[in-house]
Image (cartoon, rainbow, N blue to C red):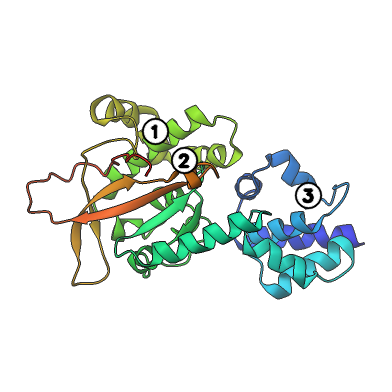
Amino acid sequence: MQANRLQHFLRGRRGHLDLSQNQVAGRLAITERSYGNWERGRVKEWTDDKLYALAEALEMSEYQTARLFLYAVGRAPQSDLCATFRRTESEDPAVAAFLGDYTVMMDALSLPSFVINQRWDVKMANLAFRDLVREVRSHPTAMPSENFLRFGLFHPDAHTVLVDHPKWQLAMLAQLSSSLEWHDEDTGLQAIRRDVYLHPALRDAYLNDMPDWVLGSGADLVHHEDAVRELRHPDPRVGLRGCRLVEETPRSLKALGLTRLTLVLVELDDGLTPEGCGAEDQQDS
């Protein structure tokens, strides 16, 4: 009985979010088959970490998370474990303290800046970045504060921030291809590529336009140097600006598998042609 309740509960939640099993599996960094077993309750042991990860992937409220625990393990969540899960992915207190201090430092910056992992999941973003995307509507899979590639490729509001959106998308498709070359077994990147193939226009651009663009413009979004693309800030005092995407990752972040990117906003009348938004790799200090 409990297994059936769990199955209906997870299916219903996924259906409400309009997500496929592939998409949920991508959020969990597991295979579609593994998630299918999770949804059917065929799990050897439901650990708290698995359940909290599942609740986050399906964007559950506190009440819904409590129902998930009840159906899966017959008890309520343990609040102390939940706090640990939400606080940081790292079990090292020193790393958690460093990331906390780094977040404070980023919030002091006036330029939009964010930290990503290899699949472009946004692990932290400063106040300027959140201000830049403050008018973006809610979306189940493509919020800019969750995954920057998904935002640029799939969010219906992306064009309001990323001006000349098809060119941004082309650069992001090139970035996806480049990331997959380095991390071909990453299920999150594979899930993004599968979603690209579900959109005919994006699929055509990925297979036909993107390879030609790479030959002429550079390898990908991050390493296309000296490129400037247009961006529109919701604050009318900032408005339309050129954007250069700059990578400036200290060794301490690189050791954690993270990359910091900053959107450097420039005036469009300074002789720069907005053809693409690339990055200038800076040396670690």
The residue furthest right is: 1
Give me the C-alpha separation between circle 1 and circle 3: 32 Å
**Amino acid type at image mark 3:** Trp
Camera-nearest residue between 88 and 64: 88
Nearest the viewer among 260 and 208 is 260
Q: What amino acid is labelled 2 in the image?
A: Val
Which of the numbered marks, if any, corresponds to residue 38? 3
Q: Is residue 68 above or below residue 214?
A: below
Q: Position of residue 268 (x, y in %)?
A: 12, 54
* Secondary structure beneath label 2: helix
Evaluate whether residue 140 shows in this view: no
Disc ID at residue 196: 2
Element class at badge 1:
helix
Q: Earlier in the sequence, mark 2 or mark 3?
A: 3
Residue 119 locus on image (x, y percent) = 51, 43
Badge 2: few (under 14), some or many (20 or more) residues near its Cα, within 10 Å?
A: many
Given residues 213 and 128, the one toward you in this image is 128
